[in-house]
Amino acid sequence: MKNRLIILLALTLSLTFYSCQNNDSKPKNGLDFIKTKGTQLVSTKGDTILLKGTNLGHWLVPEGYMFKTAQVNSPRKIDELFYELIGPDSLNAFWKTFLNNYITHDDIKYLKSIGCNHIRLPFHYKMFTDELYMGERNAGFKYFDRLIDWCREEEMYVLLDMHCAPGGQTGDNIDDSFGYPYLFKSQSSQDLMTEIWVKIADKYKNEPTVIGYDIVNEPIAHYFNNELEDLNHQLFLLYKRIVVEIRKHDKVHTIFLNGSNWSGNFDVFEEIIDDNVVYEFHKYWFDVNQGAIQSYLDFSNRHQVPIYIGETGENTDEWINDFRLLLDQNQVNWCFWPYKKMNNTRGIMNFEEPETYHLITAYAQSDRSSYLKMRENRPDVLKVQKALNAYLNNCLYKNNYVNKEYVKALNFKTD
């Protein structure tokens, strides 16, 4: 009897150990890794997925037009403006609360509830360096992990988008650059960009919630078309280098590559450099018709690769509906820009502009060319602080309200 009990106990422990091992080998959630198969995206189980989502714009890359400081429009210039208005201590407190309030788990729950299956996350390279950015240093993984945890729980995919690259990839405000796409002329910038992507890929190589890596947003603005052939070639070489380096650490995740000229020009793709790449274009403000996307569809069919429109929108509800229908009819993966804005219906979510916020807008428009002008035009600091505090409160999900017609135009749920 004693021997039987020992054998039974050993068998029970063995089965328990096997069960634990078996459970540990399974994904932590219902999501599966996504890869390319011809012109489609499929899970490793073979299920086809069509991406439909929104960009978390403004959260990790502040934009002037979303703060209604259009003349002060890049992250570092916005930081400088707020520093002038409220000083360093209050500025650090503002950024800390902004990062905690603007996007929360409640936002992700809502997006999942309406039918969104992924979000695109713009980020600044400085979040992975010792440079002070939005009041912190080396804070990238802190916010990535937070968002990925939320999305894992809600079973939504995350696309990581380097919106601002070292040296600047556009030469304009959206990537915090200095008037020229110096990324393509700077070896140190390219080295740093590659290093950051390798760190990201190494950390998330086993994370199915991350759908892939969007290497750089909207490279090469149209202002530099007289150099486009050379810049395109430099961009292609950089893509090739980064893809090769990522694949040394992560052979699974899908890589997203933007065209040049604000992502609209696919001439940059001199050859197909990897068998798990999605080709990304962005497009705004045009007449909705088949011709608007046909060249990208032709590229997809010719090379048997998926395409994805990573940004579009900023238009009327009617336009959003018409273009979304066209994309769905052509089985194009899409992600509209952006999720949330202040006092603006051209997005999924909206929140009220604070009563005294006009003081900030007026100062941004004023002459700040000298210290004398700063002192003359600077509004009352207490009123400015009141406006910023109200902004931080209003941007919380619980104080937001849905632009229902916009959501309906995306064919998402409104109830």
Image: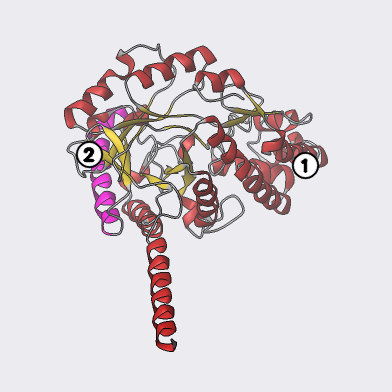
Q: Nearer the viewer, residue 18 or 362?
A: 18
One can see residue 342 in this view: yes
Q: x and y percent of residue 355 in the render?
A: 79, 29
**Where's the C terminus, which quadrant?**
top right
Residue highlighted by disc 1: 385
Asked if residue 410 is positioned above or below residue 4 in the image, the reply reads above
Q: Tag 2: Cα neighbours inside 10 Å, few (<14), some, or many (≥20)?
A: some
Q: x and y percent of residue 32 in the render?
A: 37, 47
Could you say whether the residue bearing mark 2 is in a helix, strand or loop? helix
One can see residue 104 in this view: no
Q: Main secondary structure of the magenta part?
A: helix
Residue at 41%, 43% (x, y): give it: 168
| Amino acid on which disc 1 is placed | Gln
Q: Residue furthest bottom?
A: 2
Residue highlighted by disc 2: 233
Q: Which mark is residue 123?
A: none
Residues in magenta, as a range: 224-248
- Find out whether residue 229 is within the magenta segment: yes
